[in-house]
Amino acid sequence: MTKKTFYTTGQVARLLDMSPATIFRAIEKGQLNSSTTPGGHNRISREELEAFLRSNNISLRVLGSRERRARVLIVEDNPAELRVFKRALQAAANLEIVTTTSGYEAGCLTKSFCPDIILLDIFLADADGREIVKLIRSNPELKATKIAAISGAASPDDLHTIRACGVDEFIQKPVTPDDLRETILNLLQG
């Protein structure tokens, strides 16, 4: 039995050079069928995407020629941990990884790189990661972007505010490279 391929709305938008908002409108209007994950995210099967392409006279070649690796943005201000996280994720196939140590740069990269997932140190030297999460969540074009918050200094009160700000997952430091990779890959699949 072959594994069924699913795409996030952000992935479909990038494949078709459209904005995520355009893809959401197609879903809302019933032009593009999708399923919804328990977390409220849309997933589009390859079969449904192909049907949408055919009905809109778009060549199916865009799927083969433009499929790309999942994009991961790592935001960590500790250079040693940043290297460990990057190496851990580079061990996984099909990931395109970009890193930064700055909360400000993370905002710029989120817009230009359009990551599928962001691994975000919540307590950065130059920014509060919770505020970064709120900004990302307020942008409809980034609705499909998953966010995995990571921290080693989170108190029980911090954990509550971190989860409440809209992250998809919280990872407690220290974390093994294998556990980090597994968590990120599971988020990309979910």
Image: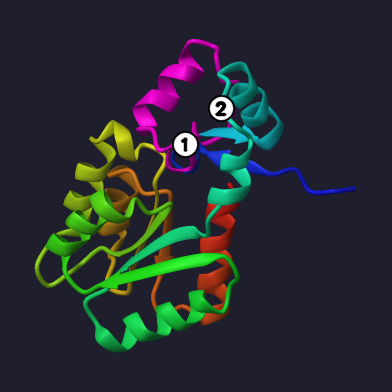
> Which label sits on residue 16?
1
Classify mark 2: residues with Cα within 10 Å, few (<14), some (14-19) or many (20+). few
> Vertically, is 78 above or below 56?
below
Which residue is the extreme one toward the top? 29
User: In x, y percent, where is residue 172?
Assistant: 41, 70
The kind of residue tagged 1 is Leu
Query: Total of numbered circles in the picture?
Result: 2
Colour scheme employed for the rendering of this structure: rainbow
User: In x, y percent, where is residue 75?
Assistant: 28, 68
- Magenta residues span 13-41
User: In x, y percent, where is residue 11?
Assistant: 48, 43
Which residue is the extreme one toward the right? 1
Q: Secondary structure at mark 2?
A: loop
Give the left or right position of residue 89, taking residue 117 as reference. Answer: right
Camera-side mark, 1 or 2: 2
Marks 1,2: beta carbons within 8 A:
yes
Give the left or right position of residue 123, taking residue 35 as reference. Answer: left
Classify mark 1: residues with Cα within 10 Å, few (<14), some (14-19) or many (20+). some
Q: Nearer the viewer, residue 96 or 165?
A: 96
> Vertically, is 105 above or below 76?
above
The kind of residue tagged 2 is Ile
> Vertically, is 31 above or below 154?
above
Q: Nearer the viewer, residue 148 or 46?
A: 46
Which residue is the extreme one toward the bottom? 80
* Residue pictured at 25% horizontal, 63% vertical: 122
Give the left or right position of residue 181, taking residue 161 as reference. Answer: right
* Residue pictured at 44% horizontal, 26% vertical: 23
Q: Secondary structure at mark 1?
A: helix
The residue identified by callout 2 is 58
Quarter-of-image position of residue 81: bottom left
Asked whether residue 25 is drawn in magenta, I would say yes
